[in-house]
Amino acid sequence: MSWSKEFFKGIIKENPTLVMLLGTCPTLAMTSQAVNALGMGIATTFVLLGSCIVISLLKNIIPSQVRLPCYIVIIAGFVTLVSFLLQVYLPELYSVLGVFLSLITVNCIILGRAEAFASKNTVSRSIADALGMGIGFTLALLLVGSVREILGMGSWFGIDLTFGVLEPILLFATPAGGFMVFGFMVAVVNKLSHYQISKKKMGCEGCPGGCASCTSGCSEKKEGND
């Protein structure tokens, strides 16, 4: 698989949040506002990229018996680095992310990519995979956070969009609204992915109406029999 395919699979085809349903805890907790979602996504991407590079470099040195504890220690080191940087340069974002920043250490996306990919592949492929998964996770959080902030607060990145005319729907700013938006996003992505799969099918089994509506597979079979 090429570098580009490794990168883009995490953004669309294997999006960790909307397709594989990983990292749902920060997705629901940190998406009440778009800026919080973006901050969590960037922090997670940084930790994912750094830890996957180190794990890929050390994959032949780390004993298999203690690989998971070693992975967690490496990930925790990058989480600590991100925490220090946010404390110094973005203290407001650091206070908003709170405990969920520390929980990046046990985020199933990061530990899963370390175990399933970085520990078995080269550094270049691990970088492509980590960037794709991280950006895919960030885009998913930003999408959910943008919808929730626009509908629930009438703003986007703090910019008022209602102009004092429309009343925001406060439900979307609550945890229940987060579940609703997230569920809707997952359903849309799932429907689109099934549609793409059905388009790739050849023959009568790929036609929604069966042989009666088939204009490709059945006609080709008929010509072959003739």
Image (spheres, rainbow, N blue to C red):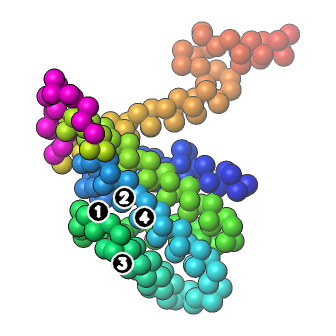
Q: Residue 34: x, y in percent?
A: 32, 47
Residue mark closest to the camera, 4 vs 1: 1
- Residue 93 tag number: 1
Residue mark closest to the camera, 4 vs 3: 3
State which region is magenta: 159-174
Circle nearer the N terminus (4, 1)? 4
Circle nearer the N terminus (1, 2)? 2
Which amino acid does the dot numbered 4 rest on? Thr
- Residue 39 tag number: 2
Q: CA distance from mark 1 to mark 2?
A: 7 Å
Does residue 111 appear to the left or right of 64 in the view shown?
Answer: left
Q: Main secondary structure of the magenta part?
A: loop
Disc 4 is placed on an element classified as helix
What residue is shown with label 4?
Answer: 44
Q: CA distance from mark 4 to mark 1?
A: 14 Å
Circle nearer the N terminus (4, 3)? 4
Residue under the image location 36 percent in, 60 percent down: 40
- Residue 84 tag number: 3
Disc 2 is placed on an element classified as helix
Which amino acid does the dot numbered 2 rest on? Gly
- Disc 1 + disc 2, Cβ < 8 Å: yes
Residue under the image location 63 percent in, 60 percent down: 128
Q: Decide: is 68 above or below 133.
A: below
Q: Residue 197: x, y in percent?
A: 58, 33
Q: Residues within 10 Å of mark 4 (few under 14, many from 20)?
A: many
Residue under the image location 78 percent in, 12 percent down: 222
Circle nearer the N terminus (3, 1)? 3
Q: In front: 168, or 102?
A: 168
